[in-house]
Amino acid sequence: MDQAFLRVASQIMVLFFIMLAGYAARKTSVLEPSTVKGLSRLLMNVSLPALIVTAMQFPFDTEVLASSIQIVIISILAYIGIISFSYLYAKLSKEEPKRKDVIQFSLIFSNVTFMGFPVVNVIYGELGVFFAALYNMPFNLILLTLGVAIMSRNAKGSGSRKGNIKKALMSPGIIALIIGFGLFIFSITLPKPLHQAVDMLGNTTTPLAMIIIGALLGDVSLKSIPGDKSLYLLIFNRLFLMPLLAYIPLRLLGFEGMMLGIPVIIIAMPVGAVTGAFASLYDADDYLASKAVFITTLLSMITIPIWAMFL
């Protein structure tokens, strides 16, 4: 069997067991919903920004800079393709409007923060996280503008678009990316005690993210999943078709290594954990959103190692 598959599958199993701990903690009420929200804020505002900064702590390199520009261009083109695909799917779909909103949102926004960064870190290490952070730059801006527009188009009120853009640009992840990139460009190394502290905080990202995912899944009922045909199609598109549509052109254009692997891996991530929160906030089908997050997260434990075989 392919060594890449075995290596990634082994690491994914580690993540799965940590996720299982979070699931058990939520089911036994060790973690309450308010605690999970607090952990999520800790991850978004402290752990992940620290991981991004430490991932960029290496001397300036023109090849890395060139690759950085490449990954940003690939990201922009990928999001254009994904958004176009989602609108085509929504136009052809005969689903009830609020279910259609959730499905389209789920196609665009994968679970980059809680799953993508930890998996990229496992496969490619800190340099991979650096490129993944650059690739993910458009995510927050698209989430808080187009994402809000999709989820709220059949709901009352959606908030200020100008405010959403400002919020996206001022997110801790973007600020950490700017700081980290500045340190990289000018080859500035953090003082050793500070670097160790930031590095230790960054190292909490993966276990913290998996515990949060497990806890979130602990609130989902499995009863109606088997009979939901539209959910099956969403699973196929999210975990198989869309990564394939990214893989083929990138491979044909000669991309390899991280320039091929990071876009494909991120696109192959399960439905974003934020989907349920947005669906609830904007009165969309939050039950469908929860099921989509749950089942795609579980199945991604199998599909991600399979994709790793081709990268």
Image: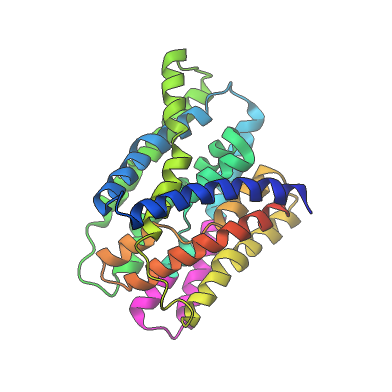
Please tell me which residue lies in front, 47 or 241.
47
| Residue 116: % across, % down | 52, 49
| Residue 210: % across, % down | 45, 48
Span highlighted in magenta in the image: 78-103
Dividing the picture into quadrants, the one containing residue 78 is bottom right
Please tell me which residue lies in front, 125 or 14.
14
Q: Is residue 205 magenta?
A: no
Magenta-colored segment: predominant secondary structure? helix
| Residue 69: % across, % down | 58, 40
| Residue 262: % across, % down | 61, 47
Vertical arrangement, residue 177 with respect to residue 199, above or below: below
In the image, taking residue 63 as reference, residue 281 lies left or right, namely left
Number of numbered discs present?
0
Taking the spot 71% from the left edge, 51% from the top edge, the residue there is 5
Q: Is residue 100 magenta?
A: yes
Taking the spot 50% from the left edge, 60% from the top edge, the residue there is 297
Tell me if residue 9 can be seen.
Answer: yes
Please tell me which residue lies in front, 201 or 275.
201
Dividing the picture into quadrants, the one containing residue 26 is bottom left
In the image, taking residue 130 as reference, residue 286 lies left or right, namely left
Please tell me which residue lies in front, 74 or 47.
47
Which residue is farthest right? 1
Tell me if residue 141 can be seen.
Answer: no
Taking the spot 50% from the left edge, 17% from the top edge, the residue there is 189
Which residue is farthest front? 28
Which residue is farthest bottom? 94
Vertical arrangement, residue 13 with respect to residue 131, above or below: below
